[in-house]
């Protein structure tokens, strides 16, 4: 997800990286995915979130990225997630339903 305006984000839209990280860990990983947050490293620098780790399924990884991209203050998501199980055929367009 790219920033919707040219140049740096207006100050009114900025959140601290720590606040963004906390929301992703609590709301996305623990809340929505019910996963142990130690399985995914969440690094935030200037609103750019990098998710690194392994989740149970491909769908879990795609949902984590989609929900993270919708978190207030996030300007981009770098997806470095892997998964243990390919839980659906590539022909089902889950990604298009999430974005």
Image (cartoon, rainbow, N blue to C red):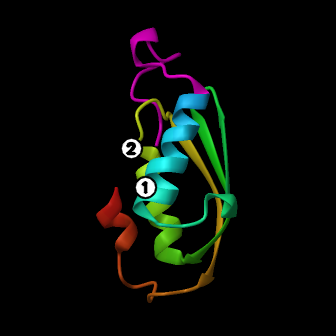
Q: In x, y percent, where is residue 79?
A: 61, 56
Disc 2, SS:
loop
Residue 90 part of the magenta-drawn span? no
In which quadrant of the rendered view does residue 95 lie? bottom left
Magenta region: 1-17
Asked if disc 1 and disc 2 are in contact, CB closer than 8 Å, the reply is: yes
Q: Which mark is residue 70?
A: 2
Residue 40 appears in the picture as rendered: yes
Residue located beneath label 1 in the image: 66
Left or right: residue 45 compared with residue 97: right
Residue 15 part of the magenta-drawn span? yes
Residue at coordinates 55% horizontally, 39% vertically from top-left?
Answer: 22
In which quadrant of the rendered view does residue 66 lie? bottom left
Q: In x, y percent, where is residue 19?
A: 53, 30
Residue at coordinates 46% horizontally, 84% vertically from top-left?
Answer: 90
> Is 23 in front, or is 54?
23
The vertical placement of 99 against 15, above or below, is below
Q: In x, y percent, where is residue 96?
A: 34, 65
Q: Which mark is residue 83?
A: none
Residue at coordinates 45% horizontally, 45% vertically from top-left?
Answer: 69
Among all residues in the image, which is located at the extreme left?
97
The vertical placement of 33 against 23, above or below, is below
Among all residues in the image, which is located at the extreme top?
11
Residue 65 appears in the picture as rendered: no
Left or right: residue 45 compared with residue 19: right
The vertical placement of 5 against 81, above or below, is above
Q: In x, y percent, where is residue 77?
A: 56, 46
């Amino acid at each position: 997800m790219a920033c919707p305006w040219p140049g740096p984000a207006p100050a009114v839209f900025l959140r601290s990286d720590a606040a963004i990280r906390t929301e992703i860990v609590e709301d996305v990983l623990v809340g929505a995915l019910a996963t142990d947050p130690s399985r995914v490293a969440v690094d935030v620098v200037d609103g750019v979130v990098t998710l690194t780790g392994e989740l149970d399924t491909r769908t879990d990884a795609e949902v984590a990225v989609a929900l993270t991209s919708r978190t207030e203050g996030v300007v981009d998501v770098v997806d470095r997630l892997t998964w243990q199980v390919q839980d659906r055929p590539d022909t089902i367009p889950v990604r298009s339903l999430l974005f």
